[in-house]
Image (cartoon, rainbow, N blue to C red):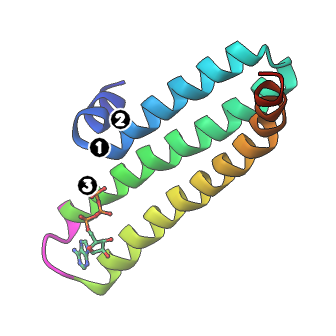
Amino acid sequence: MEGIAYAMRNEPHMRVHLAASAVIVAVACALKLPPEDWMWLFSAVAAVWVTELLNTAVERAVDLASPGSHELAKIAKDTAAGAVLVASAYAVAIGLIVLGPPLLDWVRSL
Ligand SMILES: Nc1ncnc2c1ncn2[C@@H]1O[C@H](COP(=O)(O)OP(=O)(O)OP(=O)(O)O)[C@@H](O)[C@H]1O
């Protein structure tokens, strides 16, 4: 829990993920989604949180091991950031697939 609290205090992206997760849960509640849709949404939210936490861990470990500039330090940080990007793309795709159709139905019903 200490690591999560640290990342929440020091990584602005973590606060964005928290806000986005809260919005997704609120929208899913409002749309009364079935349990299987909740599973997809939770998998996407967890993927983003897990990769962001690991990215933070990699950044801190690299800064500790290589305070100066080094090609391998750059590769390590950029690869960890790439994992967050992949997870974020997955989350956007899941969000569009799961939330898109019921949201469109709701808009059309207005
Ligand atoms: N020790 C280093 N040696 C070489 N390049 C580095 C090193 N540290 C960082 N970099 C490069 O600079 C970029 C920014 O580094 P930084 O430590 O700010 O990471 P970040 O991904 O922007 O993290 P944060 O989420 O904290 O903003 C990295 O993506 C990497 O390309």
Q: Residue 46, percent across and down?
A: 60, 36
Q: Nearer the viewer, residue 100 or 18?
A: 100
* Residue that carries the numbered disc 2 in the rendered image: 15
Q: Residue 32, percent across and down?
A: 78, 13
The boundaries of the magenta stretch are 64-69
What's the residue at 40%, 39% (across, down)?
16
Q: Residue 54, percent across and down?
A: 44, 49
Assign a secondary structure to mark 1. helix
Say which quadrant the C terminus sits in: top right
Q: Amino acid at mark 3?
A: Arg
How many neighbours does mark 3 have within 10 angstroms: few (below 14), some (14-19), or many (20 or more)?
some
Q: Amino acid at mark 1?
A: Pro
What's the residue at 60%, 36% (across, down)?
45
Majority secondary structure of magenta residues = loop
* Residue that carries the numbered disc 1 in the rendered image: 12
* Residue that carries the numbered disc 3 in the rendered image: 60
